[in-house]
Amino acid sequence: MSESIEQAREGIERAHHAHEHEGDTAARWVAVLVALFAAALALADVGEKDAQTSFLMNHISMTDDYAYYQAKNLRVMALANTVAVLESLPDAASPAVLGRIKAARATEAVLKDDPARGNGMKQLLVTAAVHEKRAGHALHREHEFAGVAGALQIAILLASISIVTRMAALRWGAGLIGAAAIGFGLLVVTGMA
């Protein structure tokens, strides 16, 4: 972002210099345009960083949910093996062994589905899917904001060059690219893009 702001600052200085020495009123308008694009670029960079943070947070949460799911799955498999071993014992019909089998099956059932605490394997898969969807959306927004920032950098560059070359086509091109970038940025912010 500092490089973009430096480009904008140089463009404004060139416009100011051109206006003082040559009386070029177009340069003054280009300086205003560059300042507007620089402000929009700063906002796009903030949006990009916010989307990146959201992506990372949701991705980490999703990874944690899947890891927790896998840990619970290992415990379920261990309990199922415990039940199989207990049932194969010669005294499997004794009350003590039947009690241990019943407790293992009850624990296994809670590990698979625990709506009371919301952290059974079933609930963890749902939560992980939500975090995965949010992470994907945030990554998409990050890329969109990066595109907006890139277009604004190009617009600032063209506007700056138009001051030196005095080419009206470059000014118009910079204005069109910058306006399109700002418009698309607004669509990204509102969630319409």
Image: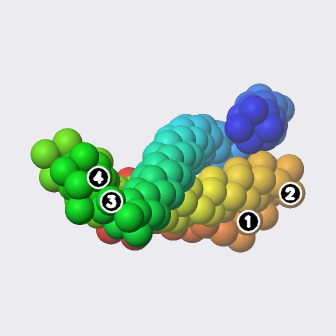
Q: Is residue 135 left or right of residue 150?
A: left
Camera-nearest label, 1 or 4: 4
Looking at the rendered structure, the kind of residue marked 1 is Leu
Q: Secondary structure at mark 2?
A: helix
Farthest residue to the right: give it: 165
Precedes in sequence: disc 1 or disc 4: 4
Q: Where residue 139 sits: x, y (%)? A: 54, 60
9 is higher (above) or lower (below) than 27: above
* Residue at screen point 77% across, 53% down: 157
Kindly check if marks 3 and 4 are in contact, taking CB atoms under 8 A apart as contact: yes
Q: Quadrant of the C terminus?
A: bottom left
Camera-nearest label, 4 or 2: 4
Camera-nearest label, 2 or 3: 3
**Is residue 48 or residue 139 the one in the foreground?**
139
Q: Which residue is mark 4?
A: 97
Q: Which residue is mark 3?
A: 91
Tell me how the rendering is colored: rainbow
**Is residue 118 or residue 90 the one in the foreground?**
90
Give the distance between the C-alpha atoms of the residues marked 1 and 2, in whole angstroms.
9 Å
Give the distance between the C-alpha atoms of the residues marked 2 and 3, in whole angstroms.
96 Å
* Residue at screen point 86% across, 50% down: 164
* Residue at screen point 69% across, 45% down: 27
- The label number, if any, that marks residue 165 in the structure image: 2
